[in-house]
Amino acid sequence: MPDAPAILYYGDDFTGATDTLGTAARAGLRALLFLRLPDAAQLQAAGALDCVGVAGAARAMSLAEMQAELQPIAQLFARLGARVLHYKLCSTFDSAPEVGSIGVALQTLRAGLPAGTRTALVGGQPDLGRYCLFGNLYARAGSTGEVFRIDRHPTMSRHPVTPMHEADLRRHLGAQGLHDLRLAPWLLHTGEGAALTQAWDAAAHADGLLFDVRDNEDLQRIGALLWRAAQQAPVLAAGASSVVQALAPQLVQHTPTAQALAPATSPVFAMAGSLSPVTAAQVAAAQSFEQVWVDPQALCTDAAFLQTQAADMAARLQAGRHVLACTVRPGQSPAADTGVSGRELALAGGRLLRAVLQQAPDVRRVGVAGGDTSSHAVQALDAWGLSYRAVVSTGVSLCRLHSDDAQLDGLEIALKGGQMGAPDLFERLLHGS
């Protein structure tokens, strides 16, 4: 690459990775998200970048899978000569000792980084309604809803794979192996930052320092501290897209120009996996789409059924209609109510997306809802990268797909997690902002 990037980030799911891409691009950083570990030729072709992303799926992996996934990321960090390695995790920190362990992720990455690397955890993302106070995490329900302590959140406390039963992030992450995690409470976020610096220095030999976050001013102070520290030794920073949001003002030399979301110019295909309450409301509001409810068990187990469904949806799209495919009805759990696991359903969703696009070449804009569904949907396509186009809604970016397949190259795609986006998200995807 022509220049060493300042930041390398790994997204533990695809939706989060695209949100961080959007955060970096809107802040004025030169950013590109690779859909797999890039080789030297792809990095050279990308040109000078401030922020390099790699999209992954670690939050749904076993511990052994995570270690195999993340060891090459630490090696890439060393090759690039970046200063900050950002492990981008969900803003709700949902994880477990056996699945998607944040502790195992940080331990694996740290083992491959130079001696003296320091670890920071940024505990909130105010723009998404995520706050950390005295080490306890709070999250808004929906785009305009009430703020709950995370262990009482109506969705995250009941997550089907990694329910959040502990709000104190030190206790939550201590169960994942980070036993000596220090805290920089919001009371230190004052003045010229001397108290924050002292807390950072005092945690030099700990498993990491967790920063409270109340507002974006806290992020500015944290970003200034972390960038100063990164000039002395590499920094491993875990957190939501707020990590890049905090660092960007230290790197950007100009005010970026906002890009408006333009209306779609051809039929739009959207797909929703398991429906969180937020996604269910977005599906209900998608009045411009023909909604197709697909039997999830048949989709996962019957290849002929999948092809028939794809042909039907492609015919509607080629006729100029917009289609929204849903695989789980509101309130259903894939494992309990459909007879298939969430992973099986996400993989089948990826196969469905690929089959639809093969038969509907007129489609140039796609939306996918659901973290695991988005990850497997993109992996099913023959593509190698994403660049930022525009914001669809808070936490949801519209991206341009980069592929060696001429039919796929330039496809616009928006990926969203279950808790992200305004109620009219699908309508915005079609009609623009």
Image: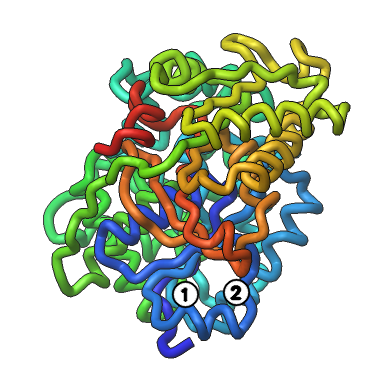
What residue do we see at 67% from left, 62% from top?
70
- Residue 101 visible, this orientation: no
Mark 2 lies on residue: 113
What residue do we see at 38% from left, 57% from top?
388
What residue do we see at 32% from left, 50% from top?
390
Q: Hey, which quadrant is residue 284 in on the image?
A: top left
Question: Percent position (x, y) of residue 190?
Answer: 16, 50
State the residue lying farthest toward the bottom: 2
Q: Is residue 388 left or right of residue 275?
A: left
Mark 1 lies on residue: 234
Given residues 377 and 431, the one toward you in this image is 431
What residue do we see at 53% from left, 56% from top?
87
- Tell me, what colour scheme is on the image? rainbow
The number of numbered discs placed on residues in the rendered structure image is: 2
Cβ atoms under marks 1 and 2 closer than 8 Å: yes
- Residue 104 visible, this orientation: yes
